[in-house]
Image (cartoon, rainbow, N blue to C red):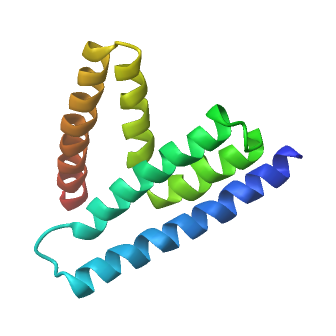
């Protein structure tokens, strides 16, 4: 497949993933309530499961082309949630016995992410 066609596929799938994320989050707030981020939790868990499923189909079973794998993982699931990539990368580190690296990645991602949001809020309010 031509790289330009793959890029268009990634963009289109990313748009679909984004719309699915917005829809699921909206449904969760409407039906469960706004007191807890249930929509985000649902998106992250569903996206993580789907990432594992697609990766297994592509790499373990060999059922997907490299282009299809990229379109689904980077485009669709990247638009749906990047948490699935974080969860997958952490799982890979754990499977390869890299516990200190996985722990550092989890801590850095979460603590630095919260700090970055705080810094952005401060910078944006200044």
| Residue at x 67%, y 59% (from the top left corner) | 11
* Residue 39 quadrant: bottom left
Residue 56, x across and y down, in percent: 58, 39
One can see residue 82 in this view: no
* Front-lying residue, 21 or 69: 69
One can see residue 4 in this view: yes
Residue 6, x across and y down, in percent: 78, 50
* Front-lying residue, 32 or 1: 32
* Residue 22 quadrant: bottom left
Residue 62, x across and y down, in percent: 72, 36
Which quadrant, please, contains the C terminus?
bottom left
Left or right, 124 with respect to 53, comes to: left
Left or right, 9 with respect to 103, comes to: right
Residue 7, x across and y down, in percent: 75, 51
| Residue at x 37%, y 62% (from the top left corner) | 43
* Front-lying residue, 94 or 73: 94
* Residue 67 quadrant: top right
| Residue at x 89%, y 46% (from the top left corner) | 2
Q: Residue furthest front?
A: 61
């Amino acid at each position: 497949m031509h790289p330009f066609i793959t890029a268009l596929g990634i963009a289109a799938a990313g748009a679909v993933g984004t719309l699915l994320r917005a829809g699921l989050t909206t449904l969760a707030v409407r039906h469960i309530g706004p007191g807890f981020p249930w929509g985000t939790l649902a998106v992250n868990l569903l996206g993580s499961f789907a990432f594992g499923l697609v990766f297994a189909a592509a790499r373990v079973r060999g059922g997907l082309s490299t282009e299809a794998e990229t379109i689904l993982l980077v485009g669709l699931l990247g638009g749906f949630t990047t948490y699935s990539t974080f969860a997958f990368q952490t799982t890979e580190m754990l499977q390869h016995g890299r516990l200190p690296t996985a722990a550092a990645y989890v801590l850095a991602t979460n603590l630095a992410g919260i700090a970055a949001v705080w810094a952005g809020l401060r910078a944006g309010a200044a």
